Image: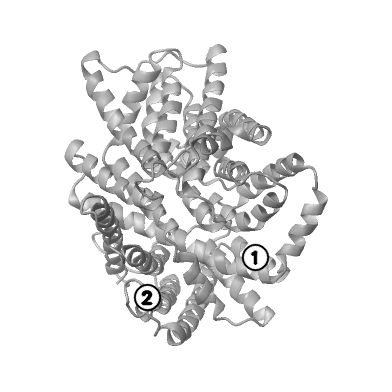
Amino acid sequence: MVIGLDHVIGWILVALVVLNGASVFMRYVMLDSISWSEEGIRYLACWMALLGGVSAAWMDEHLDMNLFDEIGGGTFQAVQRVGLQFLTFIFGVVLTWQGVIYCMKSGMQTAPSTGILMLFVYASIPIGGFLLALVSLVKIYDVFVPPAISDHGAKHVL
Amino acid sequence: MIVAALALLILLISGLPIAWSFGLAAIFALVWEGLPLLNLPTKLFAGIDSFVLLAAPFYIVAGELMNKGGISERLIRFSIIVVGRIRGGTAYAAVVTSVLFAGISGTAIADIAALGNIFINSMAKEGYKKAFAAALVAAGSIIGPIIPPSVIMVLYAAVADLSVLKLFLGGIVPGILLGVACGVVVFIKGLRGELPPSNLMVPAEERPKVIRDGLLVLTLPGFIVFGTLSGVFTPTEAGGIAVIYAIFLGTVVFRHLDLSGLLKSFRAAARLTAALFMMIAAVEVFNYILIIGGIEEWTQGVLNFFKGNPTVFLLICVVVLLFIGMALDAGPALLLLAPVVLPLTRAMGIDDIHFSMIMIVSTVMGLISPPVGVCLFVTCRIADIRLRELWKELQWFFYAQIGVIVLLVFFPVLSTGLPNWLRP
């Protein structure tokens, strides 16, 4: 699932570059502008941030202070990992819960240029939050039951 | 506000990712203050939904593509032609390459990753101390976030509500000065006979091609700055065009990139961007708590204390930022502090770009400061040396670069001169 997510965010970034290039091309070469390009780029970027945040969490690529990385034995490290993933889980759950409420309250508005329902944009918040909570649960599970490593070095879980 | 700050401190120290630490501390403070939790998604979304911010992924992916497209070696060969075969020539070439590479990469880690292996190994073979070579690469790496295009400046511009272009222009002279500071240390070491003569050279018949390749690569920062300065593109659009130019160079001219390499770069850049955007979004929620909690009263107190002494205030800021930079990464430190400190400096009559450059350079120095400077660890890993060995050599570069910050404090024209002269 996370590998799929990783491909999705990669393609969103490709789409951002294409849309941005098309916008400049239209303005200077075709002497016309794509009125919805800026809004489209911003909303795609929101999806990329929320989904990419999950992908980066799975690959441990978020910045942290690393103070306890080399302190304590295996048990201390395991307890710390579980604790941190539990905190991430809480953040994911609150994001999902409040994201759903936000979608219900403001999702029926329409975007000024693209005319799409804002629900399709705001939905990135609860979906991102839900996937983050899911990833943190899997990571807690991984601490107790270490995943098997495939021939390609990839973890099987998710 | 104190509760939020304490919660943040505990979460950061616990090792939780910085983005989640800010988010959870904000949730905790919202509950504590009895404010609606709906502020979380609202402010979070507002934090990401910015066109200015979009320049960041474009510069990240352009740097990544240029790097994979084989620019490191081309820039090094170009620098060797520029610096020549003088004593310590390879060390000077490392400094010049760091400055030139800064115009492409935009991040310090990218500089070390691209130049570390090549310079540390080749300099060790020439007779340089490995720790000296590593220190030089680490010190040069912090020029990356200062000379445009700079990812940190894009993020900073978004949270501080400043012009990206003005910040880019403001970073050119300080970035070059940081390079000169490294050059001065190399020069003094050379005078003391501590550096070997350079063995590196580019054969005469290859020089035209090396110069052509070097100029093609260096077109990128020039065209970002002049394209935006002339009003042809916005900084965000310039970033997108830079990506297309990087793809063209990597696939058609240098032929180092294939489709799978391209997609891999896009995925890596998207993940890095997402991590940065989530951090910005969470900081936005946290800053809302600070405003609600009465940060303005606190800043008014500080303002009264330093009334009439802006230079003293700036010097104290430098010291505090250097200490913060030692413990917290440059990105989150800037994102958290900029909205708090900028209103103060504005009230004192300090130019936004002047203060921003001091703040950015001081915080970025944290990347090479013990105990948690990220660039220190990456360099130690690449060079396979201990932190103590690295610091023994790095400290002289560090002190020289601190000297540059002091110059920036006393001579605002160094950072404000170009933006004011070109008036973007």
In the image, taking residue B143 as reference, residue A45 lies left or right, namely left
Q: Which mark is residue A150?
A: none
Q: Quadrant of residue B367?
A: top right
Identity of the amino acid at label 1? Ile
Residue A146: name its quadrant: bottom left
Q: How is the image coloured?
A: one colour
Q: Which residue is mark 2?
A: A111
Residue B51 rendering spot, x and y as whole percentages:
41, 60
* Residue A133: percent from left, percent from top: 44, 77
As rendered, which of B103 and A139 lies closer to the eye? B103
| Residue at screen point 35% across, 27% down | B76
Amino acid type, callout 2? Ala
Residue sitting at the far front:
A31
Give the quadrant of the N terminus of chain B: bottom right
Q: Secondary structure at mark 2?
A: loop
Mark 2 — on which chain does it sit? Answer: A
Q: Residue furthest right?
A: B305
Q: Is A137 drawn above or below residue B147 in the view shown? A: below
Q: Is residue B108 left or right of residue A3?
A: right
Residue at the (57%, 17%) spot, across then down? B188
Subunit that carries the residue with mark 1: B
On the image, numbered disc 1 is attached to which residue? B10
Of badges 2 and 1, the one in the foreground is 2
Residue A68 visible somewhere in the drawing: yes
Q: Secondary structure at mark 1?
A: helix
Do the residues at discs 2 and 1 belong to one chain? no
Position above or below: B229 against B91: below
The image shows residue B258 at horizontal and vertical percentages of: 18, 47
